[in-house]
Image: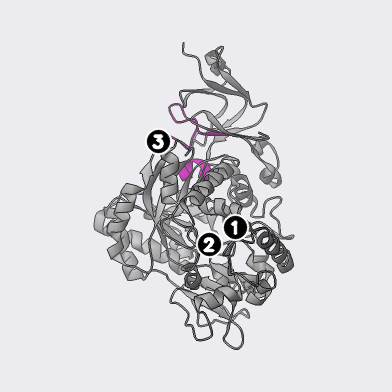
Amino acid sequence: MQHADVVFSGGPVFTATTQRTRATAVAVTDGRIVAVGHDEVRELIGPTTEQVDLAGRMLVPGFQDAHAHPVWGGLDLMRCNLAHVFGTPQLYLDMIAEYAAARPDDEWILGGGWTMSAFPGGTPLAAELDRVVPDRPAFLPNRDGHGAWVNSVALRLAGIDRNTPDPADGRIERDADGNPSGTLHEGAMGLVNRLLPRTTDDELQQAMLLGQEFLHSFGVTGWQDAIVGSYGDAGDAGPAYVQAAERGLLTGRVVGAIWWDRTRGLEQIDDLVAKREAYRGGRFASTSIKLMQDGVPENFTASMLEPYCDGHGHPSDNSGISFIDPEVLNEAVPRLDALGFQAHFHAIGDRAVRECLDAVEHAIARNGRSDHRHHISHIQVVHPDDLHRFRELDVVANMQMLWAAYEPQMVELTLPFLGDERAAWQYPFGDLQRSGAVLAAGSDWSVTSPNPMSAIHTAVNRKSAPGLEEGEYEPFYIGQRLDLGTALTAYTAGSAYVNHLDEVTGTIVVGKYADLAVLDRDPFAGPDEEIGLTTVEQTFVEGERVYASGS
C-alpha cells in the first residue's frame, strides 16, 4: 500500500458536491486527493505522512475568486492605500499627507481606495487635496475604481478646465461655475491616466506576488483576473503572470480576462487572439475577454432601462451609459464565442444586464451552444423579466456577495436615485438560485475585501460581516438570501466551473488536485450571525502549504 503524503482528519469536510457528504478525513498523494472518507483513511498514514489534525475545524475546497484584480490589489498595498478605511475626509487627508511626506521624491502621489460615502455627494474636492499635496500631481481612484480624486496640479497638467468637454464615457465633476472640482468619473479619468508614470515590470511582478500572498491568506487558491491588458494606471498584469509562471512562483490557478478596449471596435479581435497566445504558461491562461458594459449607480453611469430618479422620486433625463454600443456588442460576442473565448461581462444596471444577455443570445443563434461559460459579474440591478434568461442561455451569475447589504453608500448614493421598485431588484441571488442559474462568486478585490467568508456571511445574512459594518441596519431584502451550503459552493465549485477548472479543482473528490483550505471552525455548527468570524488557518495548493496563520 502506498502511504499518503498528507492526511487531514478529525474534523468535518465540506466537499462542495451535490451529495453533501460529511466526510471527516482526506488523504493526498503527489498533489492529488486519493481518499475521502472517515477512519479508513488512517490506513494510508505512513512514517513520512504529514498529519493535519483538524480538531473539529472544517476542511473546504480552496476558494476560487471569479472576479478579482490581485495585481492592482498588490499595487494598492505598495502605494497610498486608503482601502477598507471607513473614515472622514480628514482621516483620508491625514493618511495622504503622511504618505506624501514619506515619499518626497515621487513624481506623482498614487494610490486610492476611498469610500464615496465619506464625501458629500460622493465627490471630494481638489481644494481639499491641495492642502496636503500642493506641489505634485495626485491621482487617487475610489474603492470601486469608477472615479478618481485629483488635485489642482493634476488638473492643470491634464489641461482640464471649464472648457474641457465631458468624454462620451465619463463625466468631469464641476462646481457651480462649471470649473472642474476634483472628481473624475469613468472615462474622464483617462484625461489624467495618460500622464501617469509607467508602472515598471518589477513593480507589477512585486504587486502580483503580494496579491497572490494576500489571497492565499483567505484560502483562495484560484481566481479570474478580471482585467489583463492595458487599462487605467496599473499597467498590464499579463506579463507579470507569465513571468511568475516561468519562475515557478505562480501558486494560484489564474484565468486572465483580456480587456476589451471600448475606444476601439471589432478590429481589435486579432490583437486579443495574439494576447491569448502570449499570456499563458504554467497555471495561467488568458481565455476570457472582459467587456465592461456600464459604470456604477453612485455616479449615474450604470446603464438603466428607465431614467434615474432625481433624489425626490421624480424621473431625471439620465439613464446611464452603455459603454459598448449594443450593435457592436451583438457582433463582438458571437465573433469571440466562435473563436473559443469566454465573455466576462461587467454589468450593474438592468439595461446593461439585458444587453449582455442579448449578446449571448446572438452568439447562440449564430454559433449554436458552446461550453464557454460566459458570465456576468456584479448583477446589481436585474429586471425580473431577465432572471430566467441566465439559465436558458447558460450564463453564469457571478456574484459579488459582499455588496448585498445596507451601508452608507447604498443608503445615501444609490437608493434615493433608483426608487423603491428597482431598489428591490438589487442582488437577486435567491431568485437566480430558484431560477436554476449557475452561481459563482468573486470579490472584485481591490474594490472590496477578498475574504470569501465575509462575502458568504453577507449572502446568508444580507448584512455586512463583522468588522465591515458601517452602521446598524436591517437585512437587505432578506428574501434574496442564500443558505450557507449554496454560498460556499458558489465560491468553490461554482467559480471553478467558470474557470473551466471543475474537472480538477473546486470540490473535494478523489482524483482532483489537493487545493484546500482549513477553516478555524465549522461555520455550520454556529449561528449564521457568526459566519463572518470564520478565518482561514492553512491553505494548500496541490498538497503544498502556501499559507499558515501565524507564520
Considering the image in quadrants, where does the C terminus appear? top right
Left or right: residue 529 versus residue 538 is right
Location of residue 356 in the rendering, given as x and y in whole percent from the top left corner: 39, 62
Q: Quickly name the residue at label 1.
A: 403
- Total count of labels: 3
Residue drawn at x 71%, y 68% as measured from the top left: 89
The numbered mark at residue 380 is: 2
Most foreground residue, 426 or 28: 28
Q: Nearer the viewer, residue 110 or 418?
A: 110
Q: Is residue 98 visible?
A: yes
**Magenta stretch containing residue 503, yes or no?**
yes
* Amino acid, disc 3: Glu
Q: CA distance from mark 2 to mark 1?
A: 9 Å
Q: Give the SS element for disc 3.
A: loop
Q: Which residues are magenta?
A: 489-518
| Earlier residue among tags 2 and 3 | 2
* Amino acid residing under circle 2: Gln
Q: Residues within 10 Å of mark 1 (few under 14, many from 20)?
A: many
Residue most extreme to the bottom: 177
